[in-house]
Amino acid sequence: MTLQSSESFMTEAQYLASERVSETKHEYLDGRVLAMAGANHNHSRISANVLGEFRSHLKGRPCEAFMADTKVKAGQNYFYPDVVVDCTNAAGDEDFLTSPLLIVEVLSNSTRKIDTTKKLLYYINIPALEEYVLIEQDIVSIIVMRRKRDWRSEYYYLGDHVTFDSIQLTLSVEAIYERVDNDDLIQFEQAKFDTDHQ
């Protein structure tokens, strides 16, 4: 997803009221409204891969995975993570989550700075959050930050497996990047092909 800053400032109540009737999704950061544009194919593939694996794993359990149409409240701010896991059985009139367990953001050129700075600071101050995951789309690189490890960054690349401790699920990096088209994956697949045909 890409973000475009609006010059208008709103109160939190004004934002929530306007977002309920808006055809375009907006994030709300420090009183500013940020319009969200569509994602490219690689971004969508990564988000869908993660969501699919999470939903399958969590079937029949109290936790649930949501994709980018579900807002998360972080302090006085509201964001639409690419994938979020919540275990509070969110329902009723609220149109946002307040106690996410796990948040995943797929990075793009327009969102990388905010995802790795301001959102990071607001997200890790949500008491229920246990893991924050950042996934690059143009290269193969995954960063996982965990509360129990003082939010230190751990990096994963092709050939690695990522364990999402908060939901007790391990995925290969290849599964997360399935069908994604970038140079790292092309080289990795070519190397595998060459090895298999020697």
Image: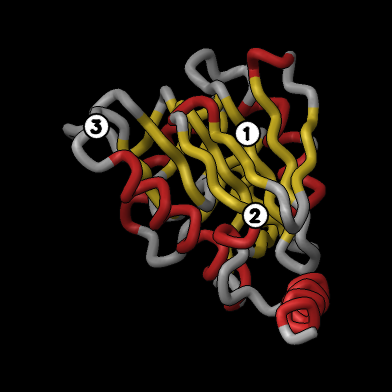
Circle nearer the N terminus (1, 3): 3
Q: In this view, does 161 lie above or below 188?
A: above
Of the two numbered discs 3 and 2 in the rendering, the one whose residue sits closer to the viewer: 2
The residue labelled by disc 3 is: 61
Label 3 sits on a secondary structure element that is: loop
Label 1 sits on a secondary structure element that is: strand
Of the two numbered discs 1 and 3 in the rendering, the one whose residue sits closer to the viewer: 3
Taking 192 as reference, is 86 left or right? left
Q: The disc labelled 2 sits on which kind of residue?
A: Val
CA distance separating discs 3 and 2? 24 Å
Q: Is residue 101 above or below residue 137?
A: above
Give me the disc on residue 42. none
The residue labelled by disc 1 is: 132
Q: The disc labelled 1 sits on which kind of residue?
A: Tyr
Residue drawn 69% across the image and 45% down it: 134
Q: x%, y% of residue 78?
A: 52, 37
Q: x%, y% of residue 139?
A: 80, 65
Residue drawn 37% across the image and 36% down it: 96
Using a 10 Å C-alpha cutoff, classify the residue at mark 1 as few (fewer than 14 neighbours), some (14 to 19) or many (20 or more). many
Q: x%, y% of residue 141?
A: 77, 53
The residue labelled by disc 2 is: 173
Q: x%, y% of residue 39?
A: 58, 71
CA distance separating discs 1 and 2? 16 Å
Circle nearer the N terminus (1, 2): 1
